[in-house]
Image (cartoon, grey):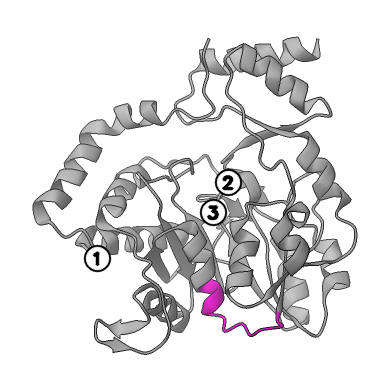
Amino acid sequence: METPLLNLKRQYQQLRPELEKALAAVFESQRFIRGPELKELESAVADYHGIAHAVGVASGTDALLLLLEALDLKPGDEVITTPFTFVATAETILRAGATPVFVDIDPATFNLDPNRLEAARTEKTRGVVPVHLFGLAADLDPILAWAEKNRLWVMEDCAQAFGAAYRGRKVGTFGVGGAFSFFPSKNLGGFGDGGLVTTADSRRAETVRILSEHGGRDKYNVVMLGHNSRLDTLQAAVLLVKLRYLRLPAEPEGSYHTYNQYTVRTGQRDRLQKFLAERKVGTAIYYPFALHQQELFRKTARIAGSLEQSEATSREVLSLPIDPLLTEAEQDYVIEQVKEFFG
């Protein structure tokens, strides 16, 4: 039975009438940039998270970058994060003018290990960017407590975790703000790139909005160096439809996992992937290399202590098919193949 890693065609077919109606409304209005659907989406996402502000931008990468720029980093500043994540997390720290500092992960959760933060702190440290990897909220209580004690900020990378929660509260509502991605493979995915920033701070939200519009308070009043980073109306229309169907089970105490990826770990990763491919089961490796092992960050980042857990995890992780429309038969098939491999 062919079971792809993610079946976007099936998702589209299920929502096709509503999606086509929403897109047709944008075609009719011809308001492709800053149309009413964008404001409606921003309001809906803010309400969903119980936070004051949500600002749509062109991508999850831009959400990270613009929020970092709104924090007014200076050359020489350091920002602590994890090396076991997508490149955008650390890339945007560099683009914002700071130096990423890598600390190792907890091998059980794949998220940043809060116990390693203090050893990484210097007089140059300005904040920390925990990543809610694969949809599981990072252990925020000790991270927030450590940051408050040292007068540092916490900024959440929520690119893989729309809908995830920590102790009953949605991610993206802690610290100075959260950065989300609407890449098609995400829990809430568009028909192209898209992103969004959440924050409780009205001035920070306004700064992000200005940065996304070439640095202008309005079209001909540019007040800072900015970007062209707008979430277009077509994407907003698609996301509004999909947001209505984002229904999550009740949240238990502690972290709630939204499984943006379903990732297992085995010392026989490559053999298992080959075995599953022969049986038409889609898989992916997130991530085959930790960021500190890549050429760019060997030259530009600082490594704080051993990163052996990140390196070992990169050698052993494999993501299996997961999809809101994955049938029980497909789930059973994947389980059977994995069981057969391990005998």
Residue 58 vertical position relative to residue 7 in the rendered view, above or below: below
Residue 121 placement: quadrant: bottom right
The amino acid on which the numbered mark 3 sits, given as a three-letter code, is Ala
Check if residue 207 falls in the magenta segment: no
Task: Give neighbour class at mark 3: few <14, some 14-19, many 20+ (Cα, 10 Å).
Answer: many
The answer for how far apart the CA atoms under marks 1 and 2 are is: 34 Å
Secondary element under disc 2, as helix, strand or loop, is: loop
Secondary element under disc 1, as helix, strand or loop, is: loop
Q: Is residue 127 left or right of residue 202?
A: right
The amino acid on which the numbered mark 2 sits, given as a three-letter code, is Glu
The answer to whether residue 200 shows anywhere in this view is: yes
Residue under the point 54% across and 43% down: 250
Nearest the eye: 19 or 4:
4
Task: Give neighbour class at mark 2: few <14, some 14-19, many 20+ (Cα, 10 Å).
Answer: some
The amino acid on which the numbered mark 1 sits, given as a three-letter code, is Arg
Please tell me the numbered disc located at residue 310: none
Residue at image mark 3: 159
Residue at image mark 1: 34
The answer for how far apart the CA atoms under marks 1 and 3 are is: 22 Å
Q: Earlier in the sequence, mark 1 or mark 3?
A: 1
Give the percent coordinates (x, y) of residue 168: 59, 55
Q: Earlier in the sequence, mark 1 or mark 2?
A: 1
The answer to whether residue 252 shows anywhere in this view is: no
Please tell me the numbered disc located at residue 251: 2
Q: Earlier in the sequence, mark 3 or mark 2?
A: 3
